[in-house]
Image: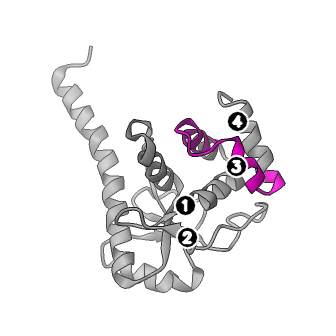
Amino acid sequence: MTPPVLHDFLLDRMVRAVELVRERLARATAALEQTGVPYAVIGGNAVAAWVARVDEAAVRNTRDVDILLRRADLPAARAALEKTGLDLFVKPDAKARDAVHVVFAAERVRPEYALPAPDVAESESPTTFRVLNLDALLRMKLTSFRRKDQVHVLDMVGVGLIDASWLSRLPPELAARLKELLDTPEG
């Protein structure tokens, strides 16, 4: 059994890790909002924002902050975020956990991806920050289709945001991926 002091210490560290990501997200989006740089939150935080609308208990934590920007807005975004002490990482494989990761709108994240990332215009502002709309977020997750992207799609399926009716909305390659997940949700 874990000693009470160590237990409390570990619990505090776990809670703080989640809070640090949320604080970084809040600082980054506030800076972009204040300077008028068009953006959309993507990745795990976007999935969490959508899932939380339906079931807070189903929200999965994420360890990073991913933002969609237009390439032309990168200098203004970098300047805005640097004023808050945040760094931008533009590479798709960036590992810095204390940074804001950028994906460029309307460009392929990787050359082999069938579709480019959506534009920031495919977003909405349900709270204090802009988040990619559900259609665009699903396309991004199905285009990447890494294990964590599959889990994110299954999270959205699990709370009823996505179902088989979405298959007809997607390009054939992405529809096949969604069907695979719907048919075998346990992998």
Quarter of the picture holding the N terminus? top left
Position of 131 relative to 104 (above/below): above
- Write the start and end of the magenta stretch as one range: 150-173
Marks 4 and 3, how far apart at CA: 11 Å
| C-beta proximity under 8 Å, tags 2 and 1 | yes
Q: Quadrant of residue 170?
A: bottom right
Indicate which disc, 4 or 2, sits on the residue closer to the N terminus: 2
* Secondary structure found at label 4: helix
Q: Earlier in the sequence, mark 1 or mark 4?
A: 1
Check disc 1 and report the residue beneath it: 94
Viewport quadrant of the C terminus: top right
Callout 2: SS: loop
Q: Nearer the viewer, mark 1 or mark 3?
A: 3
Which kind of residue does numbered mark 1 sit on? Ala
- Tell me the tag on residue 90: 2
Res. 81 visible in picture: no
Give the color scheme: rainbow, by chain, secondary structure or one colour.
Answer: one colour
Report which residue position mark 3 lands on. Answer: 166
- Do we see residue 165 in this rendering? yes
Mark 1 or mark 3: name the one nearer the start of the chain.
1
Q: Residue 182: give its label.
A: 4
The front one of 85 and 54 is: 54
